[in-house]
Image (cartoon, helix red, strand yellow):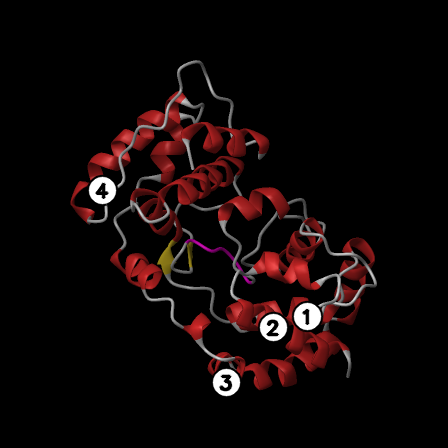
Amino acid sequence: MRNGKIRAVLIAAGLMAFGPGAAFAASCSNTGGAFPAWVEEFKQEAAANGVSASVLDRAFANVAYNKGTIRADRGQKSFKLSFDQFMKKRGGQTIISRGKGVKRANAALFARIESRFGVPAGPLIAIWGMETGFGSYMGKEHTLSAVATLAYDCRRSAYFTEQLYAALKLVAEGNLSPDARGAAHGEIGQTQFLPLNVVKYGVDGDGDGHIDLVRSRADALASTANFLRGHGWSAGAGYQPGEPNFGALQGWNAASVYQQAIAYIGQQIDGE
């Protein structure tokens, strides 16, 4: 992605105002040795692009090159599994069994979400269960370190540069702690949103005036429904392969086996 396109995406997302001559010059690398120098270079660029010094100081206070993130980024193998293998690895039947109880226990919440966004409980519960075991494990990696490491790494530098600016916006707004921890690629909360998706689709689902995808299941699930609606979900339409809303599930994850698992698990829960 060229620098101009990065700017356009960030401006469209409302992440910052760019001043004349603002530039993206920090050089990526596939080894960690130059990471501290890259951080300083990036902070200068971010400051030129309108990010305050106080936000940068807080956000980068404990940022370090994350080797675990790089290992995870290079080792994504589960999406090469067959559907049956993937379901077994992810505990699909357990998610279905537990998910039916979760749906009953949170019936009022799921009814509100469906009324607001048009998305039924099944696919939301499928995503919630597969991503974090219904919020039981959201990851242990330092979120800002993970995102900064991938912005520095050459494999997807432009993509994660967008995510890093989004994370800085969340820090500035008080919706992301500089010490937050999550998944290896910087995913946040109970359904694992990347920072830019929090900016675009995060909503207050419990009415407390804040967006907290970690501690509030209502915020996490409502935001997930809003994401799906933003990717073309149509209320009342089917979401199995070949049906209108399957495309929205494809927006959630690029792996076809993951998409199929959401559709299957969701159908088993919604069809009880």
Upstream in the sequence, badge 2 or badge 3?
3
Element at label 1: loop
Give the number of the disc on residue 35. Answer: 4
Comparing labels 4 and 3, the label whose residue is closer to the camera: 3
What residue would you read off at disc 2? 260
Q: Is 216 a magenta residue?
A: no
Q: Please tell me which residue is depicted at 45% across the width and 70% down the height of the picture.
A: 79
* Above/below status of 137 relative to 118: below
Comparing labels 2 and 3, the label whose residue is closer to the camera: 2
Give the number of the disc on residue 241. Answer: 1
Give the number of the disc on residue 88. Answer: 3
Q: Residues within 10 Å of mark 2 (few under 14, many from 20)?
A: many
Residue 66 seen by the camera: yes
Count of marks overlaid on the render:
4
Comparing labels 2 and 1, the label whose residue is closer to the camera: 1
The magenta-colored residue range is 186-190
Distance of label 2 from label 3 (alpha carbons): 13 Å
Distance of label 2 from label 1 (alpha carbons): 7 Å
The reply to whether the C-beta atoms of the residues labelled 2 and 3 are less than 8 Å apart is no
**Three-letter amino acid code at the position of disc 1:** Pro
Spot occupied by residue 170 in the image (x, y as percentages of width and height): 51, 40
Element at label 3: helix
Residue 159, quarter of the rendered image: top left
**Three-letter amino acid code at the position of disc 3:** Lys
Specify whether 116 is left or right of 166.
right
**Three-letter amino acid code at the position of disc 4:** Phe
Spot occupied by residue 153 in the image (x, y as percentages of width and height): 29, 47
